[in-house]
Image (cartoon, helix red, strand yellow):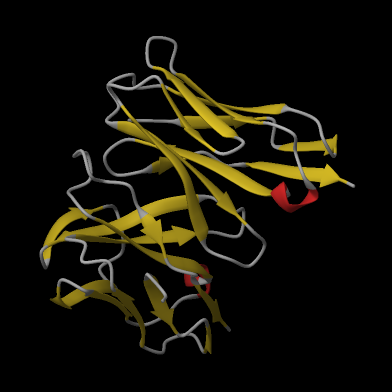
Amino acid sequence: DTAVSQTPKYLVTQMGNDKSIKCEQNLGHDTMYWYKQDSKKFLKIMFSYNNKELIINETVPNRFSPKSPDKAHLNLHINSLELGDSAVYFCASSRGLAGGTYNEQFFGPGTRLTVL
Amino acid sequence: KQEVTQIPAALSVPEGENLVLNCSFTDSAIYNLQWFRQDPGKGLTSLLLIQSSQREQTSGRLNASLDKSSGRSTLYIAASQPGDSATYLCASGGQLTFGSGTQLTVLP
């Protein structure tokens, strides 16, 4: 069984388009995250949600809007895509709040976004 | 703001060697430190999590230590195998701050 899953695995789109990436976890975790891995392989947190509430929002353009319909899902919607958005986006989850005791994070397989 | 550094950026060893990967962080008031491996084109696999109150964790051939006073963590891999070849990432803090990783190649 896949613990943290993401769809699609690959996403190729034109500049200016709007796209979404879906994430689901079947671990029963309360906290979910989105990370961006750039071309230099550097990973940086974008958002964190706990029980459908936004906890962390790093300096991310407001073209990026996370949506959490329930605890098991955290989707990432991106408006007006730009060339610089090309990266691998990872979803992750943890049982407790980031910084708490049960905060070992488990990652999805990633979505490679290419903006042309 | 937390900064995490991993040295070396790349490491190549012959099969069977024991090796140590290094991770340093600037803010000693960390909640925990987590080690991951990432295979090419894949996601991150959690290897070990060390809580801030702990000094080390072990899983199989892997042993991770944490020294908050010096701002360092090490990942020890015993009897390395070609299947250990991957990029190893350490991350610290409540919201994980990642190092840039060490790319390990174990030669048969």
**Residue drawn at (43%, 31%), measured in percent from left and top?**
B3
B60 left or right, relative to B51: right
Vertical position of residue A6 compared to residue A91: above or below: below
A55 left or right, relative to A112: left
Across and down, in percent, residue B95 comes to 29, 44
Task: Place residue B40 in its image quadrant.
Answer: bottom right
Across and down, in percent, residue A67 comes to 19, 76
**Residue drawn at (32%, 47%), measured in percent from left and top?**
A104
**Residue drawn at (36%, 88%), measured in percent from left and top?**
A18
Quadrant (top left/top right/bottom left/bottom right) for the C terminus of chain A: bottom right
Across and down, in percent, residue B2 comes to 36, 30
Vertical position of residue A95 compared to residue B68: above or below: below
A70 left or right, relative to B13: left
Residue A34 or residue A109, whichever sits in front: A109
Across and down, in percent, residue B20 comes to 66, 26
Total numbered circles: 0
